Image (spheres, rainbow, N blue to C red):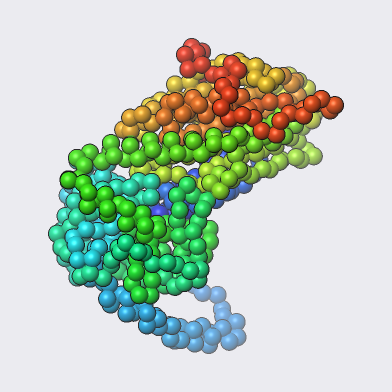
Amino acid sequence: MKFTALATSIALTGACAGALAAPTTAHTTAPTLAAANAATAATSTTATTATAPAAKGKPPPAAPASPAPPAAPGTAETAAAADTAPLPPPSSAAQHLYASAKNDILQVRSLLKSGRTQSSVGSGFLIGTSNLVVTNYHVVSQFALDPDTYVGEWVDTSGQRGNVELLAVDVLHDLAVLRVSRNGTGFFKMPEQLARLTQGQYLYSMGNPLDLGFAISEGAYNGVIARGFYDQLMFTGPINSGMSGGPSVTVDGSVAGVNVSKRLDGELVSFLVPARFAQDLLRKVEQQAKAPADFTSVVAGQLLSHQRAMVDQLLSSPLSLKPMGPYMVPVRESEQMRCWGRSNVKADKPFTVDDASCAMESAIFVSGSLQTGQLSIRHQFLRGTGLDKVRFAQLASASFKNEHFGSNKDTRLTGPNCTESFVNNQNVPLRAVLCVRAYRKFAGLYDFALLTASTDQGLMSLQSRLDARGVSYDNGMRLSRVFLESLSLAPAPGNAPVPARVPASKPATGAVDKKATAAVKPATGGAQ
């Protein structure tokens, strides 16, 4: 069973050197039976939490214009009229807000210490008359995690610039607070009583899109997005790369949120971090005596807190069971975790494949190459319709082996340490492989991957996978045991029905032993 990562459609709106592209976030996967040349079309699903910044760099040279085809009668006149038609003027509210706020909007840059060349850019805004700046964590992540290589710089609308001092980060809500060498004029305030927003209310987002210059965009507030693990506001308006960390305000200038991301598969679907989280981080800055000396340990502590809440929420109630062939498989359907299913039943294929997958629609951005704090579940039911048992066994075995658990060359995590066991759980004999990888920079965090395959049917195979990214060792084992225990046979006709749900706390019979010695070589064909 090969898990191929699908393209997703969320991009953070910070900009970094390179081509304009948006890496993924929460993702689902699609199986591929490569050995049998039976790949099925992957169905793309979307996520609602930002991940890696949309990259930004020097535009490529413009391609020569192609000769235009002969215009139809009237086309030239119509085009000429469109070219000369006046553009709609900006609203008076937007003009007034920008004129009042422009002195307190900053561009925040991450520079290489060697040569001080620009590596990434975002935005930020000064709070009151202080020298404190609110921005996104992903805008400052390079010099937060690698201060020996990167340094921060601010630039204002008049071209003045200076170094920044990082005071605090909130990686879970994608926020950071900086100190700069100038003060605000008092336009952007963060009062105790924040503005109350109503559906359809106009908001105005500011920042430096694509490193082209400071700008303001007008849109509407459309509620709180609950699919992510942490609340975000939906802003129906344009937010582009480079605007990350900029403010979004009401018509009277009250801060409603902080620009953070946008959807790539929609029109004007953008997201804001609610102002209350920035307010909380500013309070922490007021209370701390000095800035942390090491932000890597700060980020690690926040990620550990997140994984505790994530796992506790997942296991706060029993997993739901869904039928797949003669089996019952565990899934979790919630606001934060969505499930999808599909089948490749085709008359010309000697087998069928049914898929069910559930994945969290959010992940925590740590760096441009690392997102974590996410769970996913996948089940694949293979059934031979025109194969004998030997050929079907070869097909199922190839599918099971065609897995990828990570590389020993990964600079972010250690190589996978895998063990294999054969267990008999809920009357289902299973082959189970458990792989664990440790984070190199964040002590106490691991990625777990549990892969199982049923061994009780000659022409049927249930292959399941649980992935837990960025969890403690204890919570990884806890999740693995619950998942393994929940796989069971469906009730036979006339027998007592299997309970609709399985207790989440009961330890699995024959659970995968972390001390098992049978090593499994990671497969090379898939992408996790």
Residue located at (77% from left, 29% from top): 497
Residue 136 can be seen in this image: no
Q: Position of residue 495 (x, y in %)?
A: 82, 25
Q: Is residue 393 above or below residue 330?
A: above
Q: Is residue 297 above or below residue 495?
A: below
Q: Position of residue 25 (x, y in %)?
A: 47, 46
Q: Is residue 395 above or below residue 114?
A: above
Horizontal side of 322 relative to 496 (left or right) equals left
Q: How many marks?
A: 0
Residue located at (42% from left, 67% from top): 196
Q: Position of residue 525 (x, y in %)?
A: 53, 31
Residue 497 can be seen in this image: yes
Q: Nearer the viewer, residue 365 or 97?
A: 97
Residue located at (24% from left, 63% from top): 126
Q: Quadrant of the N terminus?
A: top right
Q: Nearer the viewer, residue 33 or 505?
A: 505
Horizontal side of 361 relative to 344 (left or right) equals left
Q: Position of residue 205 (x, y in %)?
A: 37, 67
Horizontal side of 87 relative to 40 (left or right) equals left
Q: Nearer the viewer, residue 173 or 35?
A: 173
Q: Is residue 116 above or below residue 356?
A: below
Residue located at (50% from left, 71% from top): 200
Horizontal side of 260 relative to 222 (left or right) equals left
Looking at the image, the residue that sits furthest to the top is 517
